[in-house]
Image (cartoon, helix red, strand yellow):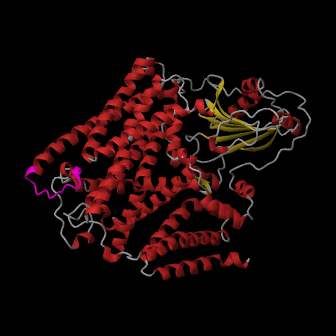
Amino acid sequence: MENRNYNVYFHTHTISGIIICAILYVIFFAGSFSFFKNDIAAWQKNTSYEANRGSVVIDLNHVFDSLSNHHKLTGRDFEFNVRHGMSAYVTMSASNDSTVKAKVKKEPEQQRGGRRGRGGNGDSAFFTYNFLQKKSVDYQSGYDMGEFLYRLHFLAQLNVIPVRLGSPFGYLLAGIVSFIFLFALITGLMLHWNKIVSNFFTFRPWAKWKTIWTDMHTALGVLQFPFQLMFAVTGVVLITNWALISPYTKFLYDGNTEKLNHALEYADSSKFKYTYTPLAQPVDLNAYIASVDQKEPGDEINRILIKNFNDDNMHVIVQTKPLTSESFAGSGKIIYRVRDQKTIYEKSAVAGASYIDQVKALVYHLHFGDFGGRPLRVIYFVLGLLGCVVIISGILIWLVARDKSSTPKHKRVFNFWTANVFLAACLSMLPVTAFTMIVLLFLKNPDQSDIYHWYFYSWLVLATYFIARRNLAITNRQVLLLSIVTCALLPLFDGIMRGNWFWSTYSRHAYDILFVDVLFLSLSVVSALAFYKVKNKQAVSMQASEVGDDDADDVIPAQKTKVIRRPKVPAKNASVQDLSREE
Amino acid sequence: MPANKKYLTRSPWIRLSKILAGVIGGYTVMFSFHLLLTTIFPQENVIATSFFTGYILWAILLLTAFLMQNHWKVWGVYAGLTLLFSLPYLIS
């Protein structure tokens, strides 16, 4: 390969990588746990969805009965985003009836859920409805750790920063990081292209640290390339697709967003006129939804829209998606006119997926890993965490490659400072996650702010502590120790506090709760293994360093314990060569 | 061993120029290319496809900007390609 190109790949890969590594780690870590979002939610609420699978009905009549106690429902639009058949995010609009609307406006504005800044005007509402327990909770108190980690993985919590460019700050940052990640993946692939086969099979765990990190980074990176590329691309698409959509709207649809949304089958732009005539006969929504549900066994309802509630022109739109065992792609829709009980539009979810359906299915299913049940999620989770390993080893290579006597002292101080901060912040996430989940067991009805406080403050404290210690080896060892303890305590306390021992959750088929307990126990075991290995390795290193040619100065204390035999850097030509060739 | 500086852009201004050319120019080339495709294939299908191809092409064009020696050449090539690809759109 031409030397110049090689060095360009190398440098762009290094720079793009070091810019995004810390945030990307957060994204990968939180994202990996988000594959188990529903399980974590079930765990926290101590309500197994698995145990109740199949026995829960979408009881809309009950929802409207209870809502009507506090609200006048006539003329409103409703949107139910059904999650795994057990609960739904519900958006209730203000009434389309201008006479009702005027009256309501005089009343004090009630508190609304602030998700994505939706909400519209005064009388609308956003809440979560649990079909299992038949009760609604507002978004903040229904908030759970699964939701927290899921939203953390696209940095939603940073949306409070009042910078808005196309999308809120957190989403924008996540999108940019995702795109730079894509760039880093491509440069990384080009960098290793010539040796892609040999790198694939190269792993030398007995060599010196830098070689281990290099091998880890290249071998895992090459191995994971397709998986990571898929995440980089679908990640950008899911979070900041406006970068493409808005120019398309401008150039191809004359700036008409509705037209584009319609063409891309994103949203239904059909309007249903409000007639100010009450519906002659009340409708049994449950019966209708049940009939839709039974009509096609190969799909499930994922969204129900109700337009002009109890008006003569009331419509029910049911959107379905196929079970992935039936069809990978597809979206179904039924529009039902209540007045004369007529289905005015029908598209099956299972048959006849359009090209757009297929592209969308690719984006969603590949990113969410929801097409192969729990085993696939576990594979996704492991691959996701291996992504974290690639990131960490990347940071360490970056540090070690620059840690030599020819580098000016101020640069080495800066490099170490960066690596120290990044590692402290990244590595403390696992114990912090387990710790926060344990704390939630002791709190009564923890809500969004509880989760925020416990998670972010404990993260801050732990990261600050590790930054202050200024020793990567200590950070690593203590994080592993903390992980062993917290991850093991989580299932233990779940058993003590709530009686959720492995055997009891198993016997009552609460597999989702059981799974979270087992997951954390496994993480504890893996941490213990890692701790054991690291300790052995470091013991060997210490001995070696006493007799070794360690030329470390006092600038970087961590290096004394971590790197035994500093690579004897061939002074001139080293930089042209690849990391793994440098031996 | 970091990359050999000998092969890298030294001037921060030229580097900035390359980054901007890669990000902005790369985007316009990518976008105009897909606009061109809409004249051949169904519009909404091209848009959907570009969810994948668009971002990957953009990232590759960003890299190409760094690979080219002269930053003015990058601007020139990207501007030329953008113009070329958007000709059908400009004419119609």
Q: Quadrant of the N terminus of chain B?
A: bottom left
Residue A465 x, y percent position in the rendering: 33, 41
Quick check: A296 above or below A421?
above
- Magenta part, dominant SS: loop
Q: Is residue A129 left or right of residue A96?
A: left
Q: Residue at x 45, y 18 (%)?
A: A498
How many numbered marks, from 0 up?
0
Q: Quadrant of the C terminus of chain B?
A: bottom right
Magenta run includes residue A566:
no
**Foreground residue among B37 and A471:** A471
Q: Residue A99 falls in which quadrant of the image?
A: top right
Q: Is residue A551 visible?
A: yes
Q: Residue at x 52, y 28 (%)?
A: A42
Quick check: A91 above or below A208?
above
Q: Is residue B81 left or right of residue B7?
A: right
Magenta run includes residue A547:
yes
Q: Is residue A553 left or right of residue A243?
A: left
Q: Is residue A348 visible?
A: no
Q: Residue at x 59, y 56 (%)?
A: A241
**Foreground residue among A410 and A496:** A410
Residue A460 x, y percent position in the rendering: 41, 41
Q: Residue A485 falls in which quadrant of the image?
A: top left
Residue numbers of the magenta segment: A546-558
Residue A334 x, y percent position in the rendering: 74, 41
Q: Residue furthest right?
A: A277
Q: Residue A114 falls in which quadrant of the image?
A: top right
Q: Residue at x 32, y 54 (%)?
A: A417
Residue A412 x, y percent position in the rendering: 27, 60
